[in-house]
Image: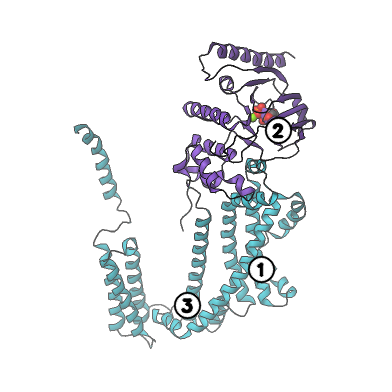
Amino acid sequence: MVISPHPVSPLGLTLSHISHSYDMPSGTRPVLDDVSLDIAPGEFVALIGPSGCGKSTLLRLVAGLETPDTGEVLAEDVLVTEPDPSRIIMFQDPTLYPWRTVRGNISLGLDIRGERNPEAVAAAIRLVGLEDFAKAWPHQLSGGMAQRVALARALINSPRLLILDEPLGKLDSLTRLAMQTELFRLWKRQGFTALMVTHDVEEALLLASRVIVFSPRPARILADIHVNWPEPRHRENPRLQELRAHILEQLETGISNIAAS
Amino acid sequence: MQNSQTISEPTRTSAIRTKTGNPGPVPAPFWPWLAGPAWLLAALLTWKLPDGDDFPDTDRFALLLLAVGLCLLILTATRRLKGRAPWALALGLGLGLWEVVQAKFLLLPRPFFGTPQDLLDVFLTDWRRLGDSLFHSLLLLAIGYASGSVLGIITGVALGRSHHVRYWVRPLMRLIGPLPPVALLPLTFVIFPSTRLTGEVLMALAAGFPAAVLTWSGVSAVDPAYYDVARTMGASNRFLVLRIALPAATPQIFVGLFMGLGSSFAMLVVAEMLGVKSGLGFYMQWAQGWAAYPNMYAALLVMSVMCTTLMTLLFKLRDHFLKWQKNGLKW
Ligand SMILES: Nc1ncnc2c1ncn2[C@@H]1O[C@H](COP(=O)(O)OP(=O)(O)O)[C@@H](O)[C@H]1O
Ligand SMILES: [Mg+2]
């Protein structure tokens, strides 16, 4: 590994009976309904569900940006109450700071902790192939490059858990394919636990070792599918196509159940 | 080859057409050569035509015109005049015309309309007092504007980040903020022991209010995701305020600083004319009292140079702080 010479020790995660709701002017809006989930260290878990069902909310709870109404998030048996650099979240939008250069954005985590480590920054920049853009401003980057910067900015913290909220959702299909490969490669090398929301079933099946399917809001777990097949994975794999159909079916029944009730 | 020529043809003709239809501000090659002679002509007229009255410094004014004219010729020869040539030409002609109309033929009512050499004479004889006035104005402005801006930015950040501050400070801001600081002048002369302090307080108020409001609006508009990204990496509240809220709000803050500078200028003049016994405003008031119009114009000129220089400095500062932005207004 370029950034940290040794793979990080991945974080195990336990979500037990999590329910959460938001206060709205019209009353409370339940978003998560008794979600329980055990994630082993080093797993790559993909979360899939209808849009607006509460996936991002779940990720925010895991990151410690919010605390659940009821239930607990445990990271290695320690209650999660606030954010921690061992659990880094990456959003759909790169959310780079426009007043920092590419290098400045990537070194954010180090600045926050008052560390100076130019080699680590250079390594992170190399890792995502942006050597020529180290001094560029974010507005000079393409969407794919910006998301690479966001990835490097996350990885420089050597996270033990990488939380990804539709990280590739806004990229064009070619860039998306390249980034998928990159993400998978990084997960293999770095060895962190990955928790990724995606709306692309195929992407989930290509990258993740486990796919969780959620119901419409308030989110409940509809299916928990272990995807253990040999690598490299291919889209044409008949087993992948089979699982894809199965998951889409789950999603549809979830939606029609809501419509029926 | 053939093809590309037919394609490029229309572009060329249309370019020619726009050029003949609308000759832009770009001067033709001979154009810059007129700037120097215009000043030399003005010098000659000033020197040779008899004065209409007993004016001071006519010869020195002619000398000044001559010197500028020669400089312009050198600049033209070394091709450094460029786009400034039309302005140099117009200024030379304008000064020459002014000299002829007012110093030679006395066409405009005096003493309200002075002559160029009157103005020059003020600078040559009274530069010490003018300089002193400039210094005092700058001092008053610097202290009032700087303290007001800093306090305004701090208040704005606090308003943007804290419920408690919003609860207590917002009503006060709404009560006092929109009031022109000038309206507080009579009151503050009573409250504060010295007129200097009064001037500074009012100037701080004039600068502080726009800075506070614009900073506040900038800080409230910061994308919450900016905070989330930093918080997930363990950022302290201090980091969130100083390294995220402030830079993110900088474009807005500068709008407030520009507005504040404008109202500080206004406040400066009023304060110096009504109470503070020094500075350019006071000088102008005094000159007007003695019907010393050339002195008044000289002070006005110094004041406008001071204001535009400070404005330019602020623009430079902004360009430095906002170099990450794609584009910005050029001053
Ligand atoms: N801060 C908030 N305040 C109120 N409602 C929210 C907030 N964040 C999300 N929601 C609502 O919660 C629901 C789930 O949102 P989210 O977790 O973003 O869904 P997903 O990521 O699955 O699309 C949505 O209906 C959304 O409108
Ligand atoms: Mg979402």
Task: Please tell me if label 3 and label 1 are on a single chain.
Answer: yes
A160 relative position to B25: left or right = right
Q: Earlier in the sequence, mark 3 or mark 1?
A: 1
Taking depth in this image into account, of B323 and B68 the one nearest to the observer is: B323
Q: Amino acid at mark 1?
A: Leu
* Parent chain of label 1: B
Q: Amino acid at mark 3?
A: Ala
Q: Which mark is residue B298?
A: 3
Name chain B's colour: cyan
Q: Residues within 10 Å of mark 2 (few under 14, many from 20)?
A: many
B284 relative to B13, above or below: below
Residue most toward the bottom?
A: B54
Q: Which residue is mark 2?
A: A62
Q: Work out whether residue A24 can be spotted.
A: no
B46 relative position to A65: left or right = left
Camera-near label (2 vs 3) is 2
Q: Which mark is residue B245?
A: none
Residue at image position (70%, 68%) is: B184
Task: Please tell me if label 2 and label 3 are on a single chain.
Answer: no
Q: Which residue is mark 1?
A: B202
